[in-house]
Image (cartoon, rainbow, N blue to C red):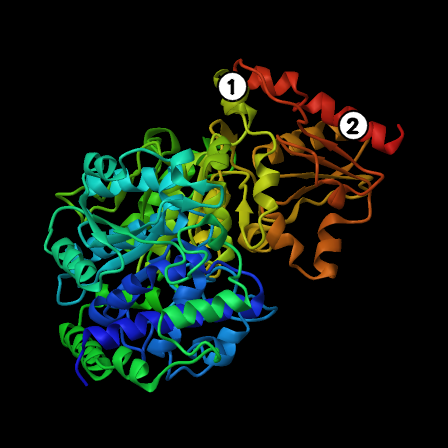
Amino acid sequence: MSTTPAISQLTANTIRGLAIDGVQAANSGHPGMPLGMADVATVIYTRYLRYDPTCPDWFDRDRFVLSAGHGSMLLYAVLHLTGIGRDGRTHAEKPIDIDELKQFRQWGARCAGHPEHGEAPGIETTTGPLGQGFCNAVGMALAETHLRARFGAHQMDHWTYGICSDGDLMEGISGEAASLAGHLGLARCIILWDDNGITIDGTTEVAFTEDVLARFVAYGWHVQRVDGHNQEAVAAAIDAARAVTDKPSLIACKTTIGYGSPNKAGKSAVHGAPLGVDEVKLTKTALGLDPERSFVVPDSVYAHVRLKDAGRKAERQAWQARVQAAQDDAFGRVLANAEDKSLDISQIAWPAYAVGTKTSTRKASQAALQAICSAVPEVIGGSADLAESNLTHMKASGAFQRATPTGRNLNFGIREHAMASMCNGISLHGGLRPYNATFLIFHDYHRPAVRLSALMRQPVVYVYTHDSVWVGEDGPTHQPIETLQALRLIPNLETFRPCDANEANEAWREALTRTDGPVALAFTRQDLPVLDRSNGGPDGLRRGGYVLTETPNATVTLIATGSEVWLAADAAATLATEGIAARVVNLPCLERFDKQDAAYRSSVLGALPRVSVEAGSTRGWERYVGLDGASVGIDRFGASGPGKTVSENLGLNVPNIVATVKQVLGA
């Protein structure tokens, strides 16, 4: 069967029919974008996208990102037509079938309201929060560029395609990523913009009148504008983009939102609401589809979309043969990571610190990262222009720049939000373990992407330094108060706050061995004494908490994290001079601790009255200290001054802890 304009158009219209049927069946969803971009999707999937439907996780496949995730029925319809995952063994690995399209947006359905990574093969990332998918695509392209430079085109030779919306390009995060992508010259990234000029509030004229293409030219992108309903024009634009070797590409596809709908096309009403039964029929009639039937796919469309499947499979098998013939152990490590996110960390020569010596945990993190860099070449990352403060520069590697893409140090610039989202894209691409760093207070600048790391179970490592009011002179704008608890509220994110240099090593080890979600590491600016943790040791940190000091005839338990553990230990020593025996408990990771069995948690926390100590908000600590306990912390904004002075004045000192203990004990 040959490709003809007629069958290509029928394919696009079939996608449109499936999309509006799914939205109508759910009585919820966004039909406008799928109707408008069906021609573009048809061109991408039938003419360009390199994949093997029988092996959807093939590492050298092209990646497609639907950044405009509200148009999810477009993606589900296309994935159904391709049959991606047809050799899948489990439900999650099998193709999306017609019955699942009928369950769009229903409880338990894989066709969720917005694309959810891991729910079905071919969904490369979770999108919906606008701009995130755009940044994920840039991260994927960065990973491909780095691996291609390291291993050659015979092993890495794929492209990243994306569809974005007006809303994606309004969000600041996309501008951050686009600027960096242009600077780095990520040429194998092609984004097709659904330039329909409509948002929920009306036309984009009310808020979005800039010259987008001129902006992207300034970013260093190759730009084009085409009729998004002309498949040949779209194909010609993609061909031109693929011929550019030093710039990413943005193709503005001028489309009509709700294309084909006689009464709603071009109107904001078609963006996020079903067409209605009568309008669905009118639209199908206008598109040459049967108005009386739903979820119909002609055999000729299946045949057209799957026409090249034998060649796709052969291409993947030829790649596998080349990889096997190369017998490249380093690439084998990359493939192992791509398969299950695992890393071989057995050769890391972790630094060791003697009890009683002093160093900050950010400096300990720096030393750990140097050891990691030398032993684990899959680790890649950087900071938001704070490498000298976060101490996250890998000295044994160069910087990833346009001329040196093999470098593993990523200079993200002052772009916290895009940094986190790009790291999601790097992780989703597979083969690399990304980390990124900033001050703890600036978690607020990339929280939406951290949340998506957790939602997608991507093992991105978030390095946060300057983790308390000990930041000092920078003042309350830079002193995190509520941030630790905000991190702990994100499901599936593990936050480690190590108490000393040796525990910083262990926290990094846990970050690198986790494969099912992100880890946040909170490190100090100020020096801390290395403690005798022989009572808990590495297993204690892995379990999230342990008894640091068990004291005979104790009458109170002090619970602390991070830099306050030594403070709690000092307070316990002072209490002992007054005849009050105190146990000291370290809880470096509340999420891990909460997962332990009840017997272990009870053995650590004990039955005595409890007082918690942490340089941050006390909210949430009541679940550990109970109604009869108390918390020493900070429930106001900080102040500018030397770190020790600020800490003392805010009550993070031994006298205040001792007084609080006495109050709890009724002494």
Query: Residue 531's spot in the image, x, y percent?
Result: 56, 38
Type of amino acid at the residue the image marks with label 2: Thr
Q: Secondary structure at mark 2?
A: helix
Q: Nearer the viewer, residue 655 or 614?
A: 614
Pointer 2 with pointer 1, Cβ within 8 A: no
The answer to whether 444 is drawn above or below residue 24 in the figure is: above
Residue drawn at 66 percent across, 29 percent down: 570
Quadrant for the N terminus, please: bottom left
Asked whether residue 636 appears in the rendered view, the answer is yes
Circle 2 packing at 10 Å, graded few (<14), some (14-19), many (20+), is some
Return the x and y of residue 182 as percentages of the image width and height. 21, 41
- Spatial CA distance of label 2 from label 1 is 24 Å
Residue type at the position of mark 1: Gly
Instruction: Name the residue beneath numbered marker 1.
Output: 472
Residue at 89% over, 30% down: 666
Task: Tell me if I can see residue 434 in this picture.
Answer: no
Instruction: Write the residue at 43% across / 47% down.
Output: 130
